[in-house]
Amino acid sequence: MENINTELSDHEPVSKGAYLLSVVRLSAVFIILCGIVYPLASTALAQVLMPSQANGSLLKNSEGKIIGSELIGQNFTNPALFHGRVSSIEYKAEASGSNNYGPSNPDMLQRTREFIAKWKVDNPEVPIHELPIGLVTNSGSGLDPHLSPASARVQIPRISGLTGISADKLEELVREHTEGRDLGLFGEERVNVLKLNMALSQLSVK
Amino acid sequence: MGIVQIVAVIIILLLLVKPLGTYLYNVFSNEPNRTDRIFGGIERGIYKLGGLKKREGMSWKRYAISFLSTNIVLVAFGYLILRVQGGLPLNPNGIGEMEQTLTFNTVISFMTNTNLQHYSGETGLSYFSQMAVITMMMFTSAASGFSVAVAFVRGITGRKTLGNFFEDFVKAHTRVFIPLALLVTLLLVAQQVPQTLKPTLEVATLEGQTQQIAIGPVASLESIKHLGTNGGGFFGANSAHPFENPSPLTNVIEILSMWMLPAALPYMYGLFAKNKRQGWGIFTAMMVLFLLLLSLNFYAESKGNPAINAMGIDASQGSMEGKEVRFGIPQSSLFTTVTTAATTGSVNNMHDTQTPLGGITPLALMMLNNVFGGKGVGLINMLMYAILAVFLCGLMVGRTPEFLGRKIEAREMKLIAIAILIHPLIILAPTAASFLTDLGQGAISNAGYHGLTQVLYEYASSAANNGSGFEGLADNSTFWNMMTGLVMLLGRYVSMIAMLAVAGSLLRKQPVPETIGTFRTDNGLFTGILIGTVLIIGALTFLPVIVLGPIAEHLTLR
């Protein structure tokens, strides 16, 4: 009862052994092509055409020493610097991720309450309703290099008090480091915390 | 601005559907065309290396056996490599071999196009494994799924045969995935995604601490990860990691990479059916369901988590827990919806941390498993529902149902019933089983109703071959590796083989001429009925468990 259309083609003059050998040979071709040739060719092209991007967009300080990647956030604890977002892995970039707290997770709610309480102590000048949620929450990667402009601005009174740099000057600094949406349309306005702090350190030195 | 940028991405997608669908038709219709001149030579070389002199059309059984045996060979190879990766080259970070059940889970996960990851890339895989196993399977599993979808379309549109699996498999690589992947890789590197064989970097930070930064050949994996709707990340944090997805622009590139091929397939189907309206009908049904669920996620995530908002802070950014500043709500919400519609399973924000109502979107898309869908499978599933819809309408008016001029009879309906029922069965039964054992319950990291959702999500993701997770679940244990491994196998192969059988069976039938009494499947009425069928079947099977999980959590959250 096999169908008429395909009946003919089912009688292929190949043995089972030859057929299986074909399957193995074809698989081997694609293991080499997709698994080895393609990634190595991509690496060669990327390294020749765009070496800076291909090697992790590293940032150097004024002495030419590499101090990190502009894409990877750092753990800032000095209260005189801008702090990034909450990171359960403390920006340890040999791994990535977060605690994956669900919206009703008591540990997450506890962490948030504690953060807000500590924030109040460190930043008495700022009313709590101005504290942006981005600063209080853990990023997905745990390595988020950015803050929203509001999350940076809200730290200015604290930093100004500790460093003596005027609030106006710091406002100006944040404004200079605010990146717009990509192509004016996609994503959100943001400030790269590492670059901002590098510029801030320069100001403090002067 | 939020809605504008979402609409902009959808418009770009719509513009891509026709040219890409036409190209796919040219590649797989096997009629001579211009692309032969560019790729013909390379393909002849590959056929020669593979010992494939004759490439005749196959019966559905032969097609299925060829598909399965190729996958089995690749799984065996992948298993071997992961078990001995410690001693192989390109392992600058000195990663050891992978544990047995985790290896079982990982190779099945990548061969079935699921990309559920119970390991973390930074610490679990050598660069060689990332390339020769993970990247390789991202190509071959996508090409396998694509081939089966094309064969299915040939069958139901009455071509001479289903085609030759090996020829389809080769062409999917040479004419679709490899050229596109190279292009997207270079675009991503230009936008700062790394591509290097150097080991993990060590830097002294601005504050003088030491920071280790994992890096590697990321871009070449990232491109095929999305083009092949695979979804497995180079790093643990997947596309939330700034090296995998550094900017909103790369986010848009990744969204379109995973979305454009599944969205172009209905158009290709319309060309095969010699009636473009058939294809647009299917596309419209998919797009309507997509927009419904996207709106739900966008709305819920913008409103945020009431428990946090009640703490009196400025919550205007929306629910930012588990999200990245550069993406914000719009780019996160769109990514979530596309990645679960297209069964990619990459994530640019953590689905576990989404608001309860927002989390329904990815869950529902995996439960429906036919809104765009992964490489080929979504189209097959939607056509399966289309045949079911025709059958239901036929019952209501008392006519023998027909689809594309062929009678739908008992054999086809039995096969379709199997394919439709296996999906809820392998989600709900293992979920229940997991709650009956300590091994299953012990993995839950978020107690209460959210815990139910975590388990449910893991199995829905495995069954739909999606691969995203509510990642808090501690799922790297023998129990979870084996359970989800089996669910992934069943989720992939049972429905694919059943659908190849349907295609083979329809191909054998004499076409019946279209009359005035024929129930048309190329108009708005049918699209509406199709959407209704999908929603009714989906709600009947999954609504109770959604009420117990996310909806209960939402009602208790304040």
Image (cartoon, rainbow, N blue to C red):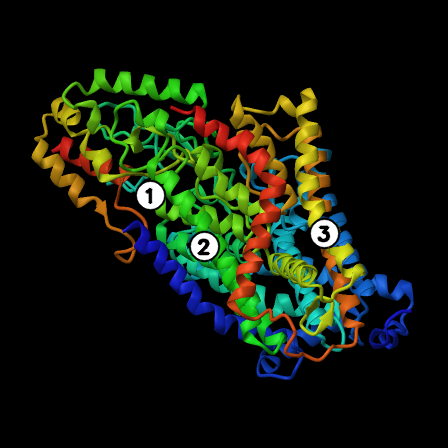
Kindly state the secondary structure of the residue where label 3 is placed: helix
Q: Please rate how many residues cluster around mark 1, counting C-alpha atoms within 10 Å: few if below 14, some from 14 to 19, many from 20.
A: many
Q: CA distance from mark 2 to mark 3?
A: 29 Å
Q: Is residue B364 left or right of residue B377?
A: left
Residue under circle 2? B255
Can you give x and y, in whole percent of width and height, for residue B274 in the image?
61, 78
Q: Position of residue B148 (x, y in %)?
A: 69, 62
Residue at mark 1:
A70
Q: Nearer the viewer, residue B78 or B61?
A: B61
Q: Residue at x 71, y 80 (%)?
A: B513
Q: Is residue A196 above or below residue B208?
A: below
For disc 3, the neighbor class at 10 Å (few under 14, some 14 to 19, many from 20) is many
Q: Residue furthest front?
A: B397
Residue B116 vs B265, above or below: the answer is: above
Identify residue type, mark 1: Glu
Instruction: Compare residues B522 and B346 and report the one nearer the observer.
Output: B522
- Left/right of residue B101 with respect to residue A136 in the rendered view: right
**Picture quarter with the C terminus of chain A:** top left
Residue A14 has which mark? none
Say whether mark 3 and mark 1 are on the same chain. Answer: no
Tell me the residue at 57%/83% (across/down): B34
Asked if marks 2 and 3 fall on the same chain, the answer is yes
How many angstroms separate mark 1 from mark 3 (CA)?
Answer: 48 Å
**Depth check: B310 or A122 in front?**
B310
Which residue lies under the disc numbered 3? B419
